[in-house]
Image (cartoon, rainbow, N blue to C red):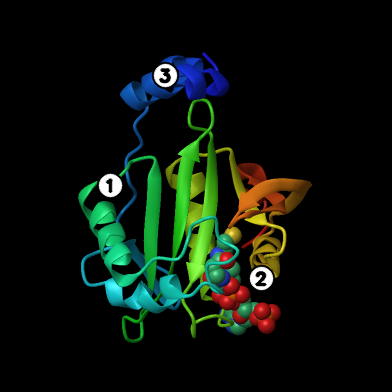
Amino acid sequence: MTDHDRLRFGGPTVRETWVEAPRREFLTPVAPDVRIRTERLVLRPLQYGDEAAFFEAWASEEWSSLLLSLPMNPAEVTAWVRRNVEEPDPFFLRLVAETVADGTVVGDVILILGGTGLTEGEIGWTIVPGQGGHGYATEAARAVLEIAFEHYGLRRVVANLDARNDRSAALCERLGMRRESHRIGDFWSKGRWTDSLDYALLADEWRAGRGR
Ligand SMILES: CC(C)(COP(=O)(O)OP(=O)(O)OC[C@H]1O[C@@H](n2cnc3c(N)ncnc32)[C@H](O)[C@@H]1OP(=O)(O)O)[C@@H](O)C(=O)NCCC(=O)NCCS
C-alpha cells in the first residue's frame, strides 16, 4: 500500500509495515545526556515553566511565517509543552537552549531521526524574538550535530527550509552544510506554494572539521 492508497483506503503503508514498525521494535534510539553545556548555552529537554518563553514567538505571524507550523496562542503553547514533556518521542529530539549566564531561554533545536536503519536525521531550529543575531542558533545547532553524528551515529543530517528563509539558509552555510537542491514550488505553506531548499552534511564531512 502506498501513501496514496492510504489516503484512499486507510491502513498502514508498506513502508510503515516493513520499515518503520521493525525499526521501532529493534532500533529505538536512546536519548543523549539530557543536559549539554556549550560555551554560552545549556541544552536540555523542554520542561514545564518554559511556556512563557515561547508565547511571544509563537503568537507572531511574522516570526512563524517561514515555518511549516501555524502560530500558536498561549493555550496551544501550553499544550505543546505538555505533549513534549509527557509524550517524549525517541525519534524526535527537542532541546531547548538557555543561557549559562542567567538561564534565559533563547530557542530550541530539533533532530528528527529517520532513514532506513536510522541513518539520517533532519535538523531544525528556532530562536525567539530578541535573541537573534548572537550566534546562539549556530552554537546550539553545532552541539546537536555532534549528538547526531557522535551519539546517534547518523551518517547524514539534512535541513529542509522555505527558500525565503535567508537567515536559516545562512545558518546552514555557517554549519558547513551543503545546499543540495532548490526545489521550485514544492512547498505548501500557509496557503501558498513556495520553493524549498535542502541542505545536508555527512558524518565524514563533520569529522573532517566542516561546520565546527
Ligand atoms: C532561523 C533563525 C534560527 C536564525 O537565527 P540567527 O539569529 O540568524 O542565527 P544565530 O543565532 O546563529 O546568529 C547568527 C548571527 O549572529 C552573529 N553572531 C554574533 N556572535 C556570533 C557567534 N559567537 N557565533 C556565530 N554568529 C554570531 C552572526 O554574525 C549572525 O549575524 P548576521 O545575521 O548579522 O550575519 C531565526 O531567524 C529564527 O528563529 N527564525 C524564526 C523561526 C524560523 O524560521 N526557523 C527556521 C525554520 S527552517
Tell which tag, 1 or 3, sits nearer the viewer: 3
What quarter of the picture does the C terminus occupy? bottom right
Q: Label for residue 211?
A: none
Residue under the image location 64 percent in, 66 percent down? 171
Mark 2 Cα within 10 Å, few/some/many (few <14, many 20+)?
A: few
- The residue where tag 2 is placed is 167
Quarter of the rendering containing residue 177: bottom right
* Disc 2 Cβ-to-ligand 1 distance below 8 Å: yes
Q: How many marks?
A: 3
The one of 139 and 45 positioned closer to us in this rendering: 45
Which residue is painted at 35% across and 27% down in the image? 24
Residue beneath disc 3: 12
Tell me: residue 158, above or below residue 174.
above
Between the C-alphas of marks 2 and 1, the distance is 29 Å
Left or right: residue 196 versus residue 42 is right
- For disc 1, the marked residue is 88
Q: Of label 2 and label 1, which has the lower sequence position?
A: 1
Q: Position of residue 18 (x, y in %)?
A: 45, 14
Question: Does dot 1 land on a helix, a strand or a loop?
Answer: loop
User: In this picture, is 208 found above or below 70?
Assistant: above
Mark 3 burial class by Cα count in 10 Å: few <14, some 14-19, many 20+:
some
State whether residue 20 is above or below residue 95.
above
**Ligand 1 image position (quadrant):** bottom right
For label 1, the crowd category at 10 Å Cα-Cα, with few meaning under 14, some 14 to 19 and many 20 or more, is some
